[in-house]
Amino acid sequence: MADLLELQNGLRVVRLHFDPAEGTEYEYVEVKNVGPTSLDLSKVRFASGIDFRFPKITLAIDESVSLAENRVQYETVHGMSTPVIGQYDEKLSNDGETLRLEISPHGFLIQEFRYEETWHPSADGGGDYLKVVDEDATSDAWNTAAQWTTGTDAITDPYALWIQSNLNTLEAATAARLADPDRDGLTNLIEWFIGLDPTNYGESGLLEPVASDPTQATFRYTRNLDSSGLIYRIQESGDLINWRDAIVTEDMSTGVSGNIDHREVTIEQTADSRLFRRLEVETAP
């Protein structure tokens, strides 16, 4: 029962975007550990209002995570560095409703409250979200308008700003990380990483050969310095199906122009190797 008491004392809903001006797809709920110990969320679920079972994660002290109605749309505003742990079923009511956090399968209560659309008109389709005023208040306070204020989601994440600047849209069909608006075979994630224009077909920026000998090969590539939340690696394959990480002996900057870092990478190779190489980019876990 110690885990239940820790969850009851520490896990709180601290932000609700229940009626976004842009539409239902931009809804989200943020929960936070406001208690003195880390929290195991593996058995926690939203049982009322929305339907969501938390994955096997531990929430550190003062750490927050978000649940989104549509993860892709969430990322177009908040980017990929914001911790969104999944999509929930159903949707938040625009007219107010009761949200219940509990431990499954027994249904022990963690937190339950009702929000109202009349509390703050700017959050009722006006573009603002609700956020709590006092995270340490008693649980009953969540049922009152005085416990909530409003805020606006300004786009500050580098990826979201890049999408807006280059595509002038936040629509999932073109703004998603794996979308390819210019159909050049490079996803938005890749184009952002290497600093290309996602609307310009045929730009170069992937691995470009510089030098090669029987023991090593050197390639040139670019990296957007704003893409610090990404992991990248050089990979090689003999059949374009099975890929492995190349052995990198040197990866150095040769100069910076604006926010683009020009780099050269040297990898080991053997004289008889006929390999394809690629630059793989992914988000940090």
Image: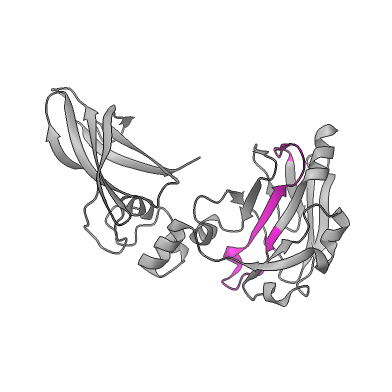
x, y percent for residue 68: 61, 56
- Looking at the image, residue 160 lies above or below residue 261: below
Q: Residue at x 30, y 36 (%)?
A: 234
x, y percent for residue 218: 18, 35
Image position of 35 (left or right of 275)? right
Image position of 197 (left or right of 20)? left
Residue 247 occupies which quadrant of the picture? top left
* Residue 27 magenta: yes
Front one among 79 and 261: 261
* Residue 103 magenta: no
x, y percent for residue 50: 71, 56
Q: Residue at x 49, y 60 (%)?
A: 76
Q: Could you tell me if residue 238 is visible in this image?
A: no
Q: What's the coloring here?
A: one colour
Report the number of discs.
0
Q: Residue at x 52, y 62 (%)?
A: 77
| Magenta residues (range) | 15-43
- Looking at the image, residue 267 lies above or below residue 220: above
Front one among 102 and 135: 135
Front one among 54 and 35: 35
